Image (tube, rainbow, N blue to C red):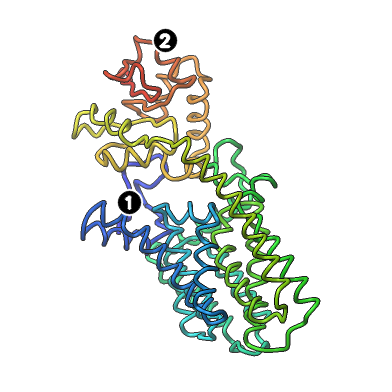
Amino acid sequence: MPKVLPQVEDLGWGHYFPDKEFLFHALTALAWKIGEAPAVLWLVPLLGIATILCLYLEASRQLRPSMAAVLVVVGVFGTAGLLFRLSLLRPHLLAVFVFVLLLLAVLRDRPRLAAVATALFALTYHAFIVPGFLIAAAWLLRRQPGFTRHTWAWCLGGLLLGTLVHPYFPSNLVMGVLHLRLALGLGSVPPPTPGTELYPPTLLQFLQAYGFYPLLLLGVAIAAWLRKPSASAERSGLMLLFLLTLVFTVLGTRTLRAMEYAVPCGLLLFAYALRVLPVRHALPAMLGVLLLCQGWLDARFYQQSWSTPEPSPEPAYAALLRQIPAGSNAKVFNCEWEAGSYVFYERPDLRFVDLLEPTFLFQASRAKFEARKGLVAGAFADPRAILRGAFHADYVLCAAGPLTRQMQSKPEDFRASPGTREDPLRLFVVRPD
């Protein structure tokens, strides 16, 4: 695995690259060797199907197979937010699958397997707080029937082992803390720099995407209060799933990414509630209505998405980047931080400024972060001087905006690459010193 990424020297990765998703990148690298891009893309449905099958296997322990299948299929495909996240080739895809494996190991009282799953999670993803919540819940329920008393210790040991043997330790721990601060809104980077998925959703946005789950928690709490179940392994599982669904749902009001873990917990909570709570019709009927309401909201989401599909920007980036001579070791100033991924994929021989997350530049150099922010806003009278002096940029890849207008007004300093006049995405050549 790479230890340096010289393409993004401004982030400090030309000296050391802190890969916080080691196992995911190892898996995608293996898939690439097998069949290049198509094989890598096949990981998306395979991991999604594997996650759904694991949920079904656990739900079928509590319900009839047909009921378990309906619950999991409708629950996953009826939750547009989760389905969207499961369709993305990103590290959280493997993390959700490993988390479900960890959840099943704890529910089935397999502490050693739970330790292995926790270690795999630490090697896969930076969000160590996710298994941390499960460890805390297992500790709280350590005296309940059906759980080995030291399950929490096995999981904690697995988490520590996976963190320490990570090939990129201790940077994986540092990056985990950084992302936790970002997810909880504790970072000091001013908006609108973070990616949109990190913005806290409004109450309406949260309810439209995941409104079923807080109502599920309320329904299960009322049913358990009315008909207190007797002590059993299933009741212990119900309590564990309730705690985890509650914690991740509360976190989901800060960042919707927490719901990637709340939904699997919530679906299994539904299955356990139907098995454990002695309510014959009221609870299934109430939750069924709630799930139908969630499906109606999701249907509106799908209808809007399909009626206004967003074209992929990849062809436009590829066409522009092909105009840069090969082997030039040129540097591109990318106005939009998300453009870095396209530059890296299409032209790995080029250098550029931003990649993956805008906060990384802020952490590496606040001076360059402010310079980049000012350039994109058109705040400098002489943008060429900043582009050459601060970033040593040979090209500027930019969508229509203040910087684009500035460069168009200074033909003595910038030359628009051929074929970009009518496209909002432009490539400009910066006059050399």
Horizontally, residue 331 falls left or right of residue 113, namely left
Camera-nearest residue between 210 and 393:
210
Q: Is residue 230 above or below residue 57?
A: below
Residue 247 percent location from the top left of the image: 66, 64
Dot 2: element? loop
Residue at image x 24%, y 39%? 349
Camera-nearest residue between 283 and 155:
283
Residue 166 percent location from the top left of the image: 41, 67
Residue located beneath label 2 in the image:
409
Q: Quadrant of the N terminus?
A: bottom left
Residue 340 circle label: none
Type of amino acid under label 1? Val
Horizontally, residue 130 falls left or right of residue 321, namely right
Q: Is residue 27 above or below residue 365?
A: below
Q: Is residue 115 above or below residue 379?
A: below
Residue ranking furthest to the right: 226
Residue 416 percent location from the top left of the image: 32, 17
Residue 330 percent location from the top left of the image: 27, 31
Q: Is residue 63 above or below residue 37?
A: below
Q: CA distance from mark 2 to mark 1?
A: 38 Å
Number of numbered markers = 2
Instruction: Find residue 50 and report its image quarter.
Output: bottom left
Residue at image x 27%, y 42%? 348
Residue located beneath label 1 in the image:
4
Residue at image x 26%, y 38%? 347
Dot 1: element? loop
Q: Quadrant of the C terminus?
A: top left
Type of amino acid under label 2? Ser
